[in-house]
Image (cartoon, helix red, strand yellow):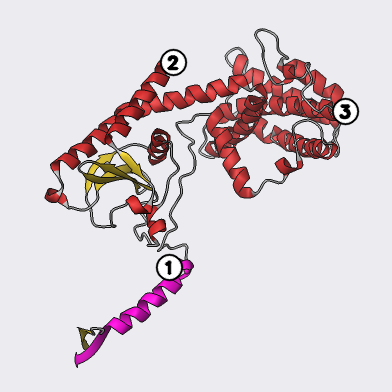
Amino acid sequence: MEENIFIKIENIKKEIKDNFIYIDKLENCPERSGGSMVEKLNLSPNIVFHFIEFIFECKHVDLDALRGTIFIDDKVTWEFLLKTEFGYLTIHDWKGYNVSIASVGGLGSEINKDLSNKAILLKRIIEENIDKFIDFRKNEAKKGLEERPLDNFMHAFVSLSFLLNLSLESNKKGTGFMESLILHVSLIDTMLRYCILLTRINQRKSKKIDSDLPELFHQDGKKYLSERAIFDLAQKELDFLHHDKNLFFESVNQLYDERNKAVHRYAITNFQYSEIREILNKHLGLKDILSELIISLEKEQSELGVGFITKDDLNLSDEDLDKEMKQIIETKIDPAIFTKKTPIREAMFSDKYKGGVNPKFKKIFKKFEKEAKETFKFEKVGENKFQLKQKYKK
C-alpha cells in the first residue's frame, strides 16, 4: 500500500511539473498587472498550500515582497505564481476558506482559452488527488513514529494535552465529558511513565536510553507495562516536592476506578453520565502536580548532562516552541488538519490597529501624500467645490 501511494504521488508530481513551472525569482516574473479568477477550489487553503509546496519541493516566496510593493488586499495571505506555455496563473487562498486560480493579465473574456484550460487542469489534478496526498502524509508520519518510539511517546504526550484542552472547551456546551475523562486518564498514565523514565535516567546518570527503559514508552508485541503496573511503579519510584504522595495516588486510584465505571461498567451499575463533570472537576489538578514534577526532573536532567533533555530544549523561544508543538500535533493526531503555518501577509488595514492602519505603513503613506501634493493641485472653482488639475513636472 505504501509503495502504491508513493508511485501515485510521483505520478501527480510529474503531471503538474509537466504543465506548470513554479516561479520564485523576481527576474522570471511578469510585471504585476490585473487578472481575473478562472477557477475556484472549495478546499482547505492550508492543505492546498502544503500540497503545492510538496509538489514543487519549494518554500513559498512572496513575490510582492521581493518587488518591494505592498499587497493591500487582506483577503489573500499566500500566492504561488505558475508559468505555462500560454501565460501565467496564480493559485492563492481567498478569505481563509477557499482557493482561487487566477490569470495574470486579461479580464473575463480577454483570458486566453488555452490558459483557461490550464487552470481547469490544475483544479482537476488538485481536487482528484488531495486525498491521496493526505493519505501519503499520514503514512509517512505513521512510519516515522514506528521507527522512533520515544518520539512517538513524546508526540503522544503533547497531543493528549492538546486534545484534552479541546475537549474541556467543548464541555462548556454540555458535551464531550466522556471523551475528556478518557483523555485525562490517558494523559495521567503518559505523564507517570515519563516521570519514571526521567527519574531512572537521572538516578543512573545514563547518557542513553538503557535497554530496560523502552518498556515504559513502547509496546513491543504482547510485552508491555499496563496502566496498573505503571501506577505501582510510580508509587515506589517517584518523589513529590510539594505534594502529599499518598494523597496524590489515592486520587489517581479513584480517577481510574471512576473511568472504569464510565467506560466498562456504565450499563451494569447506577453510574450516570452527568457524574463525569464532577469527576473531572475533582481530579483535573492531578496533571498540574505531574507537570510541576516533570519540569523539575527535566531541569535536573539538563544540569546533569544526561539523557535526552538539554538546556536548549528548556529555553526554546515562544516561536520555536509553537512551531514544534504544531508539528508534533500534526504528526500524532491528523496531518490533514494541522498543517505548517502559512506565511501570513501583514494586514494593511485592520480594526486591531489604532486608526485602522498598520503603523509600519504610516511612513509610506506620508511619502505618498508628499508625492501626491507635488504632482496634483486642487483649485477652488466655487463654494465648497474644487477642481483637480494635474501639474506636469519638467
Amino acid bearing label 2? Glu
- Based on the displayed image, in which of its 4 quarters is residue 198 positioned? top right
The disc, 3 or 1, on the residue closer to the chain's N-terminal end is 3
Q: Relative to 379, say whether 168 is above or below.
A: above
Quarter where residue 122 is shown? top left
The answer to if 268 sits in the magenta stretch is no
Q: Secondary structure at mark 1?
A: loop
Q: Is residue 384 visible?
A: no
Give the vertical position of 76 relative to 194 (above or below): below
Residue drawn at point x = 58 percent, y = 33 percent: 328
Secondary element at tag 3:
helix
Nearer the observer: mark 2 or 1; the answer is 2
Residue drawn at 26 percent across, 45 percent down: 89
| Residue 357: assigned label | 1
Tell me the residue that label 3 is attached to: 203
Q: Which residues are magenta?
A: 354-381
- Residue 224 lies, in percent from the top left, at 71, 12
Which amino acid type is marked by label 3?
Gln
295 and 277: which is toward the camera: 295
Task: Count neighbours of disc 3 (C-alpha within 10 A) and say few if under 14, some if 14 to 19, many if 20 or more.
Answer: few
Q: Answer left or right for 137 relative to 248.
A: left
Total label count? 3
Quarter containing the N terminus: top left
